[in-house]
Amino acid sequence: MQKLIEFDEKNKVFHLHNDKISYLFGIEEGGYLSHLYFGKRVFGYHGQLRYPRVDRGFSGNLPGSLDRTYSLDSLLQEYSGTGACDYRTPALDLQNEDGSYAVRLVYQGHKITAGKPKLPGLPAAYATDEEAQTLAVTLKDELTGVTVTLLYTIFKDLAIIARSAKVTNAGSSKVALKKVASMQMDLLRQDMDVISLPGAHANERHLEREKIGQGRKVFESRRGASSHQMNSFIAVLEHKADEFSGDVYGFNLVYSGNHSFEIEKDQFEQTRIVAGINDFNFEWQLDAGESFQTPEVLLAFSSHGLNEMSQNYHQLIREHIVRGKFKHREREILVNNWEATYFDFNEDKLKTIVDEAKELGIEMFVLDDGWFGKRDNDNTSLGDWSVYAKKFPNGLKHFADYVHAQGLKFGLWFEPEMISHESELYKEHPEYLMQVPERIPSPSRDQYVLDLTQKAVRENIVAQLSALLDEGYIDYIKWDMNRHMSDVYSVALPKEKQGEVYHRYMLGLYEVLETLTTKYPDVLWEGCSGGGGRFDTGYAYYMPQSWTSDNTDALARQTIQYGTSLVYPPSVFTAHVSAVPNHQTGRITPFKTRGAVAMSAVFGYELDLTKLTVEEKQAVKEQVSLYKKIRPLVQFGDFIRLKNPALGDQCAWMFVAKDKSEALVFVFGRLVQAQPTLTKTKLAGLAEAKVYEEVTSKAKATGSELMELGFYDPVVRHDFSAQMYHFKAID
Ligand code: GLA
């Protein structure tokens, strides 16, 4: 395999490259690592871009040096410590046994290997020895013996580098880690924007863009989950960059807990980006000989705007994050009973929905919340994962057998990380509930978090789920998490380790997920957290798909799915057609539009099929049969955003087959005007010279016509319209 990583001994420069990107950094005087370049591929490196020496007032110099032109306060660095003269936000902050906070990280050695090492206990991108190479650079603090190993993996054919850090206490005294970022990158460029994906429950991942100003800005979650409120991703991009042009750097953390993305524009207008686990209430005791491994950041570069960055992320998540037999398998069209019945159901009522689902060609029935313990509302029974006999007098298997007999797969909802006060589990094990001693814990949705740092708690979850899964009738599991963490404390840990609870919880969760997904490889796992509250790459390592949002309104979903697609491919997000007026917004949108939005991802229904009109049933049949045809294109094709709903009165996106032989285009209208402005849709990603025919209208055009001229959108006379076009190459 070609060499993807080189070390220039003379210039002391590392060069990671493939056909798309180059990443360069060097060892500067004193052994400090200096960032040189991340961008489009360069052929060779001849010593340019060494950081210029300038005497700057109040920017101190290297210890023991008389050179006033060399300061860590201005040098573009790779991974900074504390206690010297760099006043910018550090990547590593720790307290030594003597109480001091200093850590100076200087180059000690490096190693280049084929492939990509696993990160112990953590989800991470994976690759074979033919697909990637990894550089491990070790830095050392001479006084204490603390070492930091920076891992850089470059993939053969992706514009992405995976970065993480491992801190080892190779000295003889204790240290307390206060902050350990996964990566840092310092950029010289000045006129930059930052994009983040903030939101709320039922309103996730809105694309927000702002100018990077001087000072420090943090995009973070302190909720114990990657959260609806701020997704674990930012992009830093040229102010002039858009969907199809300009330089973009993407940062995505492969982690489902507290995260932080700091951006600091310093006194010289240089921008530092530091990303990793949030240091909020974080402190990790590292005894002599112990190590701490950070999760990894997927660092993307595109010189052609946001779409190219997204496509690299999509490819990486599909091929190097999602695992197991469902990775390349078309996902079933399902119907979920949540919005159809909420808690008000029994076996007979559900059977009528199953019958209808069979009739309409739907492939899986998912039994949502309310099937276990004594659960008639959300105040009770979390932790008691055995069937509610009142609703299923003949047991759950009896019902699952019925579903299977209709030719449908059977899926089941769980919320394994939670406990209700009113539960058998709480009666038996009150110590499983996470709370601070002597304080009344805060309820949220009337439920509490289980302390997953306790081994017994993890074993209990695995045992309860295994008991059901061993019966062999469950084809799919929806793994939910319907509150965020509070009262963070573990009775299993001593006082000085309470700063480890947030992260130990995540390690505990990952251990449980690894155990269960390995033990039951035939089960399809869908992630969920009150919709998209844990929509992150870490979760996708275990869950091939995730519920995008509790908001099923077709208009709101356009914004949510548009933002989500910045990082995550439609093959990992699920979307359902629901009833109108919509349960979250009260809005009435056409059935066709609800179908088009949901068909733009992993498709399903979330309504009472028995209540549909004859026309609606016919529409469902048509949608189901259409989706079965377009499913490979939607789930495995390239996704391209065309029109941002936040910037106009339309939203549009398309899917293109890898070989460009066909494309599906969705154009959504929002509010109509009496005197409409005429609009065009221009496509992207097609083969320029190929002739395409639109399947319904039979109109023909070359790829270049469709991309350069585009076509007029029809004038429609109702709100919330949807147009779908299916182009096939005919030559
Ligand atoms: C969460 C999920 C919903 C549903 C409910 C059940 O909100 O996102 O889809 O499963 O829980 O309580």
Image (cartoon, helix red, strand yellow):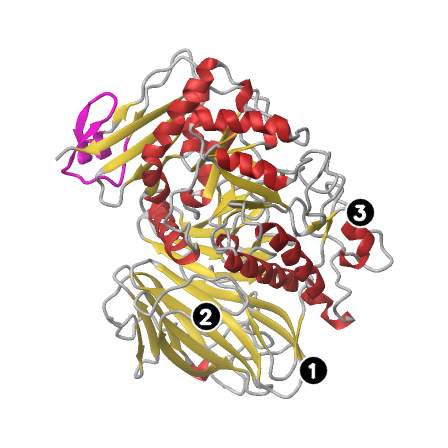
Helix, strand or loop at mark 1: loop
Task: Work out whether 660 lies above or below 232.
Answer: above
Cβ of mark 3 under 8 Å from ligand 1: the answer is no
Residue 592 showing in the rendered view: no
The kind of residue tagged 1 is Glu
In x, y percent, where is residue 384? 72, 48
Residue underneath mark 1: 97
Q: Which residue is mark 3?
A: 421
Q: Quadrant of residue 111?
A: bottom left
Q: Tell me which numbered mark, 2 or 3, is placed earlier along the sequence.
A: 2
For label 2, the residue is 78
Q: State the extent of the magenta-drawn residues as a range.
A: 682-709
Q: Examine the structure image and report whether residue 532 is included in the region drawn in magenta.
A: no
Magenta run includes residue 685: yes
Which quadrant: the N terminus? bottom left
How far apart are the alpha carbons under marks 2 and 3?
A: 48 Å
Q: Residues within 10 Å of mark 2 (few under 14, many from 20)?
A: many
Q: Gap between marks 1 and 3, in whole Å?
A: 42 Å
Amino acid of disc 3: His
Neighbor class of circle 1 (other Cα within 10 Å; few <14, some 14-19, many 20+) is few
Within 10 Å of disc 3 (Cα), the crowding (few <14, some 14-19, many 20+) is some
Q: Earlier in the sequence, mark 1 or mark 3?
A: 1
Kind of element beneath mark 2: loop
User: Can you tell which of label 1 and label 2 is closer to the viewer?
Assistant: 1
Judged by depth in the image, the label closer to the viewer, 1 or 3, is 3
